[in-house]
Image (cartoon, coloured by chain):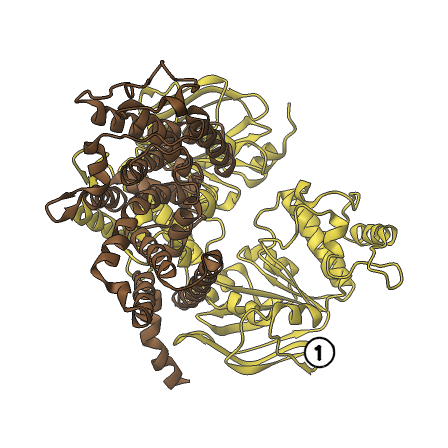
Amino acid sequence: MKMYRILLRWPEKVVLSDHFVLVLTALYFLLIWAIYPHMAGHRNLANLLSNVWPLLALVIGQMFVLIVGGIDLSQTSIMAVTSVLGAMVMAMRFDPAKFQHNPLWGVIFSEQGGWLAGHSSAVPAAIFVMLAIGMGIGFLNGLAVAKLRMPPFMVTLVAMSFFSGLAIYLTRSENIMHLPASFIAIGKGAVGPIPSALLIVVSLAAVAFVILNRSVLGRWFYAVGQNIRTASVSGIPTDRVVILAYVFSGFCAGIGSILYSARLEAGRPTLGRNLLLDVIGAAVIGGISLFGGKGKVLWAVYGVLFFVVLDNSLNKMPIEFYSIDIIKGCVILMAALLDALRTRIAANQVIAVGAA
Amino acid sequence: MAECALKIRDISKSFFGIQALREVNLDVREGQTLGLIGENGAGKSTLMNILGGVIALDGGAIRLFGDKYYPACPADATRAGIAFIHQELNLFGNLSIADNLFIDRFPQFRRSPLIDKRSTYNQADVLLSSVDLRLPPQTPVELLTPGEKQLVEIAKAMRRESRIIIFDEPTTSLTAAERSRLFAIIKKLQDQGQTIIYISHTLEDVLRVSDTIAVLRDGCLVSAGPRDEYSVNKMISDMVGRKIEQMYPTRDTCLEAKPLLEVQSLTQPGIVRDITFQLHKKEVLGIFGLMGSGRSELVRIIFGLDPFSAGKIRLNTVNIPKPSPALNIRHALAFVTENRREEGLLMEASVMENLNLLTLGKCSKLGPMGLIDRMKTTKCTQQMSKQLNIKSGPIQKHQAKNLSGGNQQKVVLGKWLLTDPVVLILDEPTRGIDVGAKVEIYRIINQLAEKGTGILYISSELDELMGMCDRILVMSNGRLKAEFQRDDYDQEAILQAAFSASN
């Protein structure tokens, strides 16, 4: 019994630590590396990391909503609609064959390009439009949840359906190409040796970290998610806090949209179609609770790393394309099982503390 | 000589080195009622969890009607004939009374998997009339009052022909009428020869229903014997391990004429009507009323949690036309709600996070919405924790949910005290906490009043109000019925006012 306890102590420490998911990811990476050495090749690592940034932006936004006890299913549709609208502001040329029957042809854009095409302020204006629309949709979501007391799942499901539909309606499901080079540089360029996407998302993460850990507002997010009644008795403006979380989520979706659109060099009405489950999956694997009140920026980073490494490794393996999702599901299941085990160990420790 | 229903020998249990029970011996004779008392953390719940099969014992033996009894899970305890009537009831609100009664063994047609509805309802009717509950068995349980739900639990225990029924704090959420009905049912059960264990902090009730009494303190059985050997005072001194000389602190402050809280003709149809009173500096003003009299609703309106249609509220000579919690807090009003778990605490958060929830703005750099000054908050909260004698681990880590009831209440109180309130509203501040913690909280309240805080004190314990308050207002049916000065306190007159009819 005693021996067993001592043997357990070290793993218990790792399992219960904040860095558990990172350790898990590292072990998985090493395992795959041993079998496929090119996993750690320079090009693959760069590719792997470039996939981390946009996803991380989305997960950080999602985390704020999860912390206040909600969920934001509309993030990916916000990406789609802002991607399209941003492109309509700044694209250099529209192909008449594809767009001349579009409802907005001749209104906002024409063959000569988008609304501000060629203008020096086109790219900043497009970015502003994308972020503002993202925040606007988030505001509407938050308003419906906080003021109308509608269930977050329904509100954001409706928003998802409406705005992804809108993106397709506005473009007749055509991608908008010919984006300005300075916009594309945001997704593909670098400042010195550092990719600009990294700079943007790391600053976003830093801001999120400061808000959550050091600011009064951050403590309000957690308080509202843990017990909204206690929060309102304590004079916390709960409605405003909830709305802010959705606005921030929309803002982050806007950032994600900018990064993805720039990488793909297109305004794409189907942008982020298959991304929603990755976003929520990464958040949950990282340890962010679906029941509210729990979440850290670090956990979001680890959850995203896990998902990106997993995706990358599956692409490297010589497996049939059609079976990739099955294997991905299995690995996520394993991680979820380990997490359940971890929760149980933590609960046992709490009983010990409680009895004391 | 009746047989021993339950024989507990040398039971011990420790959690990770801390002894929760130490060689406890206890006998319950068949057909008798044992009253079990002890402060929170004395080991009552541990003992009951062992009997209920929730946790395993370390050493010792239990015999149930002569047979060895080692429950491995709660279902074992139910099969062995032990039934629990808890504070938190184990009923399905969405199902009917009959469904709840027969959930584990529905009457069936022969061997088919179909439920025999008629037989279910007939049997349920018989059970309900035996507990004096005159309701159709089809009624959904969520529509019942707490007292009625409890009767359903008792009926369920009877359906299972339980050999021992354990009541754990059964009266906390009951109205006076429901309470006396419960005692009538218990009496009936006793007359039928039912073996009962009755656990409660309300010592008068324990004296009233028990044949024998056992007192636990720090995991040990400190005394046990027939009821006649016990009085409330002896029970308290056994529980606490010392004599409490004085339950309530001496009030000898002279009130000042300055009104801190003025309520004028406050009305909200169906809830409160035409309430007018003043709370003065240094005053402890009690509000007494039965459940549903509007006492809690009144203070919720004053604090801005619920709306009102007419009337005026003045706080520290400032008119508050549209009260909201945030506005009231800014005017130094504090409100300890009656349910600390649901509205007072963030159970998952640490003691420190709970204590500084309201005062983050005061301890921040770059304005009240800016960054938290950690040094300052740590210092403030540690000081408060020490001042209120909150017993916890490191306050940065210890979660509120792992504190005892008394310490949880102190955390709620401390959270509000950090705001330096001018007026403090307390709604049932000592509900469900043990005697030791109660006395400490009484002292704290008294000190605050002496320093000048006006205190509005709501309680359903009349003794407590008479001990603590300078003045008592009595509410009934949403109206103020009477006012008593300290010199005119008369238990009967106050109760009469509280029970008085609507007009």
Q: Is residue B42 left or right of residue B146?
A: left
Residue at 32% across, 63% down: A25
Element marked by disc 1: loop
Q: Is residue B73 visible?
A: yes
**Residue position for label 1:** B65
Say what amino acid the circle numbered 1 marks: Phe
Residue at 38% across, 52% down: A282
Task: Using the image, determine if residue B307 lies above or below residue B156.
Answer: above
Q: Position of residue A338 (x, y in %)?
A: 43, 66
Q: Is residue A142 left or right of residue B143?
A: left
Q: Nearer the viewer, residue B111 or B309?
A: B111
Q: Position of residue B380 (x, y in %)?
A: 22, 47
Q: Nearer the viewer, residue B127 or A188?
A: A188
Rendered image quadrant of residue A69: top left
Give the residue furthest to the front. Answer: A97
Task: Using the image, determine if residue A225 lies above or below residue A135.
Answer: below
Q: Colour of chain B?
A: yellow
| Chain of residue at mark 1 | B
- Which chain comes out brown in the rendered image? A
Q: Is residue B386 visible?
A: no
Report the quarter where the C terminus of chain B lies: top right
Q: Position of residue A164 (x, y in %)?
A: 45, 32
Rendered image quadrant of residue B491: top right
Q: Nearer the viewer, residue B29 or B358?
A: B358
Give the residue furthest to the left. Answer: A192
